[in-house]
Amino acid sequence: MSRLARDFFARPVLDVAPELLGARLVHGDVVLRLTEVEAYAGTADPGSHAFRGPTPRTAVMFGPAGHLYVYFTYGMHWCANVVCGVEGEASAVLLRAGELEAGHDLVAQRRPGVTSRDLARGPARLARSLALDGTHTGADVCADDAEVHLLEPTTEVDRSLVRTGPRVGVSGPGGDGAAYPWRFWIDAEPTVSAYRPGVIRRRAR
């Protein structure tokens, strides 16, 4: 299998995201086949961390493409993204879920007592299974010696099985996220995470 090159990622995020389905995410001895992703379009996307421009946290999202953006959420979880698009215009694909293909014993130590379906069913579980954390932010997945990298699918995904819908936990106009149907997944894959709509939090008067 060939590694995905920088040219693959240096395209519009809505082109890259669905084409990542079926790709293999590799970290050491662990290999995961991606079954679900979400696209985030930077300053054009209210759901993106980079919507209000670059900060020390989000600087990596502004390019170049092919680097990891790994962030901490809810005070307990890491989530991993791959930066896409043109340098200077922040966009990234959140790696939401996947099927474990290699490294089962190692992942079982990291997530004891968890069924194979649930090992990487959701972005925090995925990051934990692959031991990805804040130290990996900025890592170049396209480098020849990349510790974390992505491989082309071994078998082409049937594009008729690719589904799209609102992102998990992200609200859009109207509160239902329908304005941004930028979650992509492979239909009938058991490792795809459950959909949870965003909740609009209003300040108390």
Image: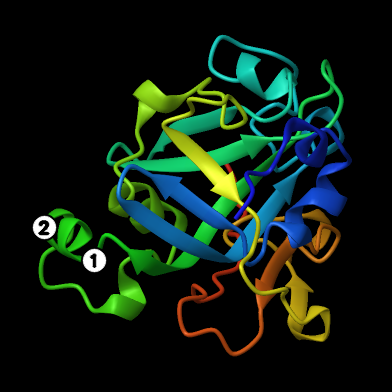
| Residue 126 shows up from this direction | yes
Q: In this view, does 32 lie to the left or right of 76?
A: right
Answer with left or right where residue 98 lies relative to residue 13.
left
Q: Residue 104 carries which label?
A: 1
Q: Where residue 81 sits: x, y (%)?
A: 57, 40
Question: Left of 182 or right of it: where is 119?
Answer: left
At which x and y percent is residue 89? Answer: 84, 23
Count the marks.
2
Residue drawn at x 47%, y 24% is 137
Quadrant in the rendering for residue 3: top right
Q: In this view, does 47 lie to the left or right of 179?
A: left
Q: Is residue 39 above or below residue 114?
A: above
Residue 204 visible at all = no
What amino acid does circle 2 point to? Answer: Gln
**x and y percentages locating residue 31 in the rendered image:** 40, 57
Whole-number angstrom distance, CA of label 1 to CA of label 2? 9 Å
Element assignment for label 1:
helix
Q: Residue at x 36, y 38 (%)?
A: 132
**Residue 109: mark:** 2
Where residue 79 sits in the image (x, y, percent)? 45, 43
Tell which residue pokes out farthest to the bottom in this image. 188
Q: Is 121 or 22 nearer to us in this picture?
A: 22
